[in-house]
Amino acid sequence: MERAMMKTFLIAAATLSLATPAIAEPVTVFGSSDAPQARVVYGDLNLSDKAGLNTLKQRVRGAAKDMCLVHYQATLSERAARQQCYSTARADGYAQADALHDRAAQGFAYAVDAAFVVAASNR
């Protein structure tokens, strides 16, 4: 009986913690509609420490790579354009990640499903 009550209490506490509003301001990147964009999720990370920031930057690199660096034969100018796309997307994502890290270090919390958009130049 006591174990069942404890289980019910833990479920209720977990539900309430998810319902508690977090200070989560969406990060929006405005760019041309034909520029590649990717969504990077960070709500599951502790951005107040370096490990969380490093994981977020790894996700940014992965999103930029998936978005810009296609693995097939291309001309030199196409490869240069893809590299520029990657560099722009990575720089955009890193800037947002650093800003989020600074805010988290000041005690701001983020929603569990928090994400931002990484934008790149036209490829």
Image (spheres, rainbow, N blue to C red):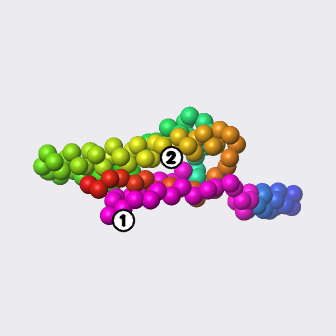
> Judging from the image, what secondary structure is the residue with disc 2 in?
helix
Q: Is residue 106 left or right of residue 39?
A: right
Q: Nearer the viewer, mark 1 or mark 2?
A: 1
Q: Is residue 63 left or right of residue 45?
A: left
**Main SS of the magenta segment?**
loop
Residue identifier under label 2: 96
Residue identifier under label 1: 33
The residue positioned 58% from the left and 41% from the top of the image is: 101
> Judging from the image, what secondary structure is the residue with disc 1 in?
loop
The residue positioned 35% from the left and 53% from the top of the image is: 120
Outermost residue toward the top?
50
Q: Please say if 115 is above or below 79.
A: below
Using the image as rendered, state which of residue 53 and residue 30 is in the foreground: 30
Q: Is residue 51 left or right of residue 107?
A: left
Screen quadrant of the C terminus: bottom left
Hey, which quadrant is residue 114 in on the image?
bottom right
Return the disc, 1 or 2, that comes first in the chain's sequence. Answer: 1
Q: CA distance from mark 1 to mark 2?
A: 20 Å
Q: Amino acid at mark 1?
A: Ser
Q: Which residues are magenta?
A: 17-42
Using the image as rendered, state which of residue 117 and residue 70 is in the foreground: 117
Q: Is residue 28 magenta?
A: yes
Q: Please say if 71 is above or below 21.
A: above
On the image, the x and y values in percent for residue 35 come to: 33, 59
Q: Amino acid at mark 2?
A: Gln
The residue positioned 55% from the left and 36% from the top of the image is: 51
Q: Tell me if mark 1 has few (under 14), some (14-19) or many (20+) residues whose alpha carbon lies within 10 angstroms of its own.
A: few
